[in-house]
Amino acid sequence: MEHSEQLTVMLIVLAYLVGSLPSAVLVCNSMGIADPRQQGSGNPGASNVLRIGNRRAAAYTLMGDAGKGILAVLLARLLGQSLEVQSLCALAALIGHLLPVFTGFKGGKGVATGLGVSLALSWPLAVVQLALWGLIMACGRIASVASILTALLTPLLAWLITPSLFLFYTAISLIMLIRHWRNIYRLARGEEARL
């Protein structure tokens, strides 16, 4: 294996490990809040931390989860890696968040980490995603609806804003939708909780 290939593999593995860091659990433990995996929706993400804790804890969780995606991409970029390798590192960080090795492969939904990835790969797309999510959230007050609709529209947005990443964002959106299947089921039954 050539040096460049070794570096790529190392960066992808590191991105996965960074993505595996459980921001919500760390934040809640440090602030004396119950483990988010055992409370509320059971999801270790910012929305559930807001539900069981407070806005400050949720904000820290959001920053931590987004920061994982940003760090994974920027590290690859700083080491001169191509957009393809940066995208692979972004995907690895997201998978790390969804299936974290440090917490028994039981992670979050990936929304905040996905935002961090977008901020690092294509900040104009991230701004549109965030505005769209915020608008939907303001109208319905259901975080999962905002996340699901944003995921559905992201491939189109990527095609318009950053077409070179269209396939990457299509894959990310599919992962997000699959990850939200329980929410989709609860929405269909009218049982999804509002914030």
Image: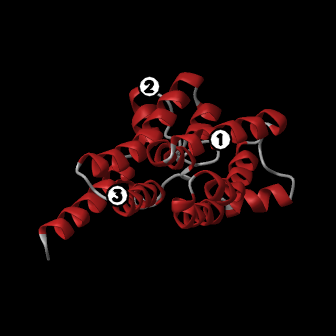
- Residue occupying the point 47% across, 58% down: 106
Which residue does the numbered mark 1 point to in the structure image? 128
**Mark 3 burial class by Cα count in 10 Å: few <14, some 14-19, many 20+:** many
User: Which numbered disc covers residue 16?
Assistant: 3
User: Which numbered disc covers residue 31?
Assistant: 2
- Residue occupying the point 26% across, 58% down: 11
- Residue occupying the point 71% across, 35% down: 134
- Coordinates of residue 163 in the picture (x, y in percent): 57, 59
Residue 184 vs residue 41: left or right? Answer: right
Mark sitting earlier along the chain (3/2): 3
- Coordinates of residue 121 in the picture (x, y in percent): 46, 48
Q: CA distance from mark 1 to mark 2?
A: 32 Å
Q: Considering only vertical position in the picture, is 57 above or below 79? A: above
- Coordinates of residue 148 in the picture (x, y in percent): 71, 54
Q: Secondary structure at mark 2?
A: loop
- Residue type at mark 3 is Tyr
Tell which of 24 and 89 is nearer to you: 89
Tell which of 34 and 108 is nearer to you: 108
Is residue 195 shown to the viewer in this render?
no
Q: Nearer the viewer, mark 1 or mark 3?
A: 1
